[in-house]
Image: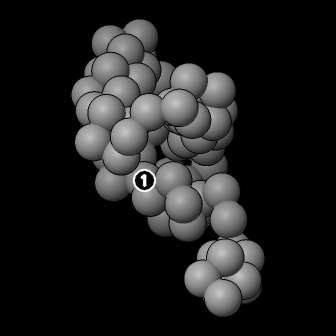
Amino acid sequence: MTEIAEAKRRLIGNCSLATAFISYCGPFNAEFRSLLSNEYFIGDMKKRGVPVSNDLNLTEFLVDDTTVGEWNI
């Protein structure tokens, strides 16, 4: 399977993970957010057979570098 095809296959799971992160992780600290996204959310998707990237960086998935640069200014 090509890299593009594999990324397309995981897109639904990655979008679901990003949506869950935005919906449920806002008020929590970074340690608990990581636990929720990496253990609970990804674990649940794998249990249900939803393809998702194991090493998905949610910040890079949700925001472009220009916006992050503006936040840092």
Seen as rendered, the residue at the extreme top is 48
- State whether residue 1 is above or below residue 51: below
Q: Give the quarter of the image for residue 37.
A: top left
Left or right of 41: which side holds 27?
Answer: right
Left or right of 12: which side holds 3?
Answer: left
Is residue 40 shown to the viewer in this render?
yes
Measuring from the top left, give residue 23's x and y in whole percent.
Answer: 64, 26
Is residue 37 shown to the viewer in this render?
no
Indicate the amino acid at tag 1.
Leu
Q: Residue at x 56, y 24 (%)?
A: 24
Q: Give the quarter of the image for residue 46.
A: top left
Q: Residue at x 65, y 57 (%)?
A: 62
Q: Could you say whether the residue bearing mark 1 is in a helix, strand or loop?
A: loop
Disc tally is 1
- State whether residue 52 is above or below residue 48: below
Q: Residue at x 38, y 40 (%)?
A: 29
Left or right of 20: which side holds 70?
Answer: right
Measuring from the top left, give residue 69's x and y in whole percent.
Answer: 65, 86
- Residue in front for this viewpoint, 15 or 37: 37
Q: Quadrant of the C terminus?
A: bottom right
Q: Quadrant of the N terminus?
A: bottom left
Q: Which residue does the numbered mark 1 point to in the structure image? A: 56
Measuring from the top left, give residue 51's x and y in whole percent.
Answer: 45, 32
Measuring from the top left, give residue 21's x and y in whole percent.
Answer: 54, 34
Q: Residue at x 73, y 76 (%)?
A: 67
- Neighbor class of circle 1 (other Cα within 10 Å; few <14, some 14-19, many 20+) is some
- State whether residue 32 is above or below residue 24: below
- Residue in front for this viewpoint, 32 or 58: 32
**Rendering colour mode:** one colour
